[in-house]
Image (cartoon, grey):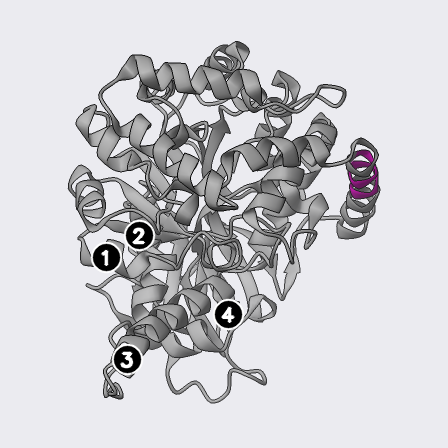
Amino acid sequence: MASEGRKLLQGGYVLTMDPALGEMADADVLIEGDRIALVAPHITAGDAQVIDARGTIVMPGFIDCHRHMWQTQLRALTADWSLYDYSSRIRSIYSSFFDPDDAYLGCYAGFLDAINAGITTIIDHSHIMNSPDHADEVVRAFTDSGIRGVLCYGMFGNPAVHEKVSLGRFLPPAWHFDDVRRLRTRYFSSDDGRVMLGIALTEAEFFPMEYSRREIALARAIGARRISAHCGLGAMSAHTRYVLRLHRAGLLGPDFHFVHGWSLTDHELRLLADSGACLVCTPETELQMGMGFPVTSRVLAAGGRAGLGIDIVSNQSADMFTQMRLNLQVQRALENEEMNRKGLMPTAIRMKARDILEVATSGGARAAGLDGITGSLTPGRQADIIMIRADRAGMVPLVNPVGAVVMSAGAGDVDSVFIAGVPVKRGGTLIGVDWPSVSARLARSSKKIIAGGAGKGFSQGEAVMRAVFPIDAKTALLSRIGGLIMRSPFTSLQNAVTNYFLKMY
């Protein structure tokens, strides 16, 4: 009789993503409890449950290092939107119409979507904390889904349904500080759970450093696993020099989890690397919404930790295959264009498929502060494993397994997913999920939220965002001046300018 605690994935092509183990054709992976026990050809494990892995690529699950999970009800709504549109509507208006049940449902369905696509770990930058009940429901969705990750509590405020949108409303309400402590005590008393607690800073690079200092102090006081922060959003924040300011304030550290980063200087990337912090790229939203090109290659060149993220399913699909391909090919295009401008053609491609696969797996785990826990099929690590079908149209013949995963595979090829040794998808189907029921509830919730947003209208959000986005010559100049002020040593001037904008908008 097979032991429920032992599983043997037998006969697959194994990509361990561990340099010491490499890759193996026709090999086995032995799982004991929640951990990987052994990876080798032809393992004998008498009482283990045998799972036929022939015709599949067996590899660690993907690490999605940045996503706003709550937006599932708004799927593809922003397909033609800029960052200005997104901020004016999703962040300013639609977020108000999510009640706690909506927050649970959006996150829960989003986690299922991720698991279905082979993602086993997520860093959720969660700015839907409209009330303590919302926070409880987001935690519940994370735990119910079975996925691993870090819930980064969003310190942002969101306008209430009947409240006028204002710039000040996005600053953290006082109760958020107490609520984070409550969550730490109630749900995250252990530091080694499958779900851990982090903090997502307010859009801190646009405010005086004292705003960041308060939130960072809170994060470190409660032992937050990650401090997630948007920064370097193209022209939007080209002059803020946030990483440099954090460095000068003595606040940079290995718990920082920066996202986007195109407009960071090479010096800032080196500071980031020296501190042990990471930088996560979300290629699809960055390319569409004017946040610049993926900066992964620059981060790695500076010796930093790089990760990949989906960002928002209100804009795109939930799979890492797309993000890997976009990041890789854009980087290649940028380098090739440098050659073209010189009248030359490249004879070699610098960034390889394996490089980006590492960023999406073992490198992503390092970026998320979870190396040693997940990210590779190293014995002793958590058994977060996926099996990708390699015997179907679009994947045959399997000449280059790494290239096939990066360039050919898609979410529909993910046959099986194990998280901490527990099967959560088998034979292409999620386990223990009543998807028709989830789908129907999601559709009703979506209709309600979208109707609410349409009823309130977007003019208030647009008015606030016109004041802060560099969308014409005047606001671009103001943005530049604002960045210079925030970088200056004149704290009183920084506070005066900030208070003026908070009162005006």
Q: Which amino acid does label 2 sit on?
A: Ala
Left or right, 424 with respect to 429, comes to left
Q: Quadrant of residue 191?
A: top left
Mark whose residue sits in front, 1 or 3: 3
Q: What residue type is labelled 1?
A: Leu
Q: Considering only order in the chain, which callout, 4 or 3, is on the residue closer to the N terminus? A: 3
Q: Pointer 2 and pointer 3: residues touching (CB < 8 Å)?
A: no
Mark whose residue sits in front, 3 or 4: 3
Q: Name the residue under label 1.
A: 300
Secondary structure of the residue carrying tag 2 is strand
Q: Name the residue under label 3.
A: 341
Q: Name the residue under label 4.
A: 388
Nearer to me, 456 or 469: 469
Q: Mark 2 points at which residue?
A: 306
Q: Pointer 1 and pointer 4: residues touching (CB < 8 Å)?
A: no
Q: Residues within 10 Å of mark 2 (few under 14, many from 20)?
A: many
Q: Tell me the CA gap for discs 1 and 4.
A: 27 Å
Q: Tell me the CA gap for discs 1 and 3.
A: 25 Å
Against 406, is 504 above or below? above
Mark whose residue sits in front, 1 or 4: 1
Nearer to me, 388 or 70: 70
Nearer to me, 365 or 168: 168
Secondary structure of the residue carrying tag 3 is helix
Q: Pointer 2 and pointer 4: residues touching (CB < 8 Å)?
A: no
Is residue 270 visible in the rendered structure shown here?
A: yes
Q: Considering only order in the chain, which callout, 3 or 1, is on the residue closer to the N terminus? A: 1
Q: Tell me the CA gap for discs 1 and 2.
A: 7 Å
Left or right, 435 with respect to 123, comes to right
Mark whose residue sits in front, 2 or 3: 3
Secondary structure of the residue carrying tag 1 is helix
Q: Considering only order in the chain, which callout, 4 or 1, is on the residue closer to the N terminus? A: 1
Q: How crowded is mark 4: few (under 14 residues within 10 Å), some or many (20 or more)?
A: many
